[in-house]
Image: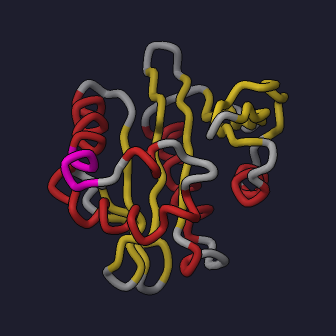
Amino acid sequence: MLSHPLTEGAELRALEPWRATEFHDHVERNRGHLAPWLPWATAIDDPAKAEAWLRKYAEAQARDGMRIYGIWLDGTLVGGVGFSAFHVPSGVCQLGAWLAPEAEGRGLVTRAAGHLTEWALRTRGMSRVEWRAAATNVRSLAVAKRLGMRREGVLRSAFPMDGVRHDVEVWALTADGS
């Protein structure tokens, strides 16, 4: 997939290591917004770390594992969506996303995540797409609902962030639509 249109002026594209400076700049601009939910938003504090992080995804994708895509709006990287886990033998993958505040409310994450969910289930034959988010991350949980996922439970005290342990909600959609 070279690119996939999301809305007028918005598209989904692979977020590859050669885009490390652009990705680093995006993280820098949005660190305060992303950091409460995403540990990497604090860890990626220079272009070399951005490149290493993106390279990890590129190498995993080459082995048919996790993969990451960016969301561009009017030519500017404003967010992303990706599989933090993609395990073909078990047919299970885990999808997540992030978005800059100025791009919120346009349906970009829902469209991008919907496209990748459909691809995983229909094209790749995965059996299950999971969405996990901190129980307090209302915007992320709303995406899972809009995707038609079902809430399966809560992993209590499962996510350590800034010295605090958070509960994580698990949502999923299966190939049979349940």
Q: Is residue 155 above or below residue 19?
A: above
Q: x, y (%) of residue 62?
A: 22, 31
Question: Could you say which is closer to the camera, residue 11 or residue 29?
Answer: 29
Quarter in which the C terminus is drawn = top right
**Total numbered badges shown on the rendered structure:** 0
Residue at the image position 41 percent from the left and 79 percent from the top: 73
Q: Is residue 155 above or below residue 101?
A: above
Q: x, y (%) of residue 63?
A: 26, 24
Quarter of the rendering containing residue 163: top right
Q: x, y (%) of residue 95?
A: 55, 41
Residue at the image position 44 percent from the left and 40 percent from the top: 123
Question: Could you say which is closer to the camera, residue 128 or residue 104?
Answer: 104
Q: Is residue 153 left or right of residue 144?
A: right
Residue 47 within the segment the image draws in magenta: yes
Residue 57 within the segment the image draws in magenta: no
Residue at the image position 30 percent from the left and 41 percent from the top: 53
Quarter of the rendering containing residue 47: bottom left
Q: Tell me how the rendering is colored.
A: secondary structure
Q: Is residue 164 left or right of residue 162?
A: right
Question: Could you say which is closer to the camera, residue 109 or residue 23?
Answer: 23
Residues shaded magenta: 46-51
Quarter of the rendering containing residue 121: top right
Main SS class of the magenta portion in the image = helix
Q: x, y (%) of residue 52?
A: 23, 40
Residue situated furthest left in the rendering: 18
Q: Is residue 167 above or below residue 79?
A: above
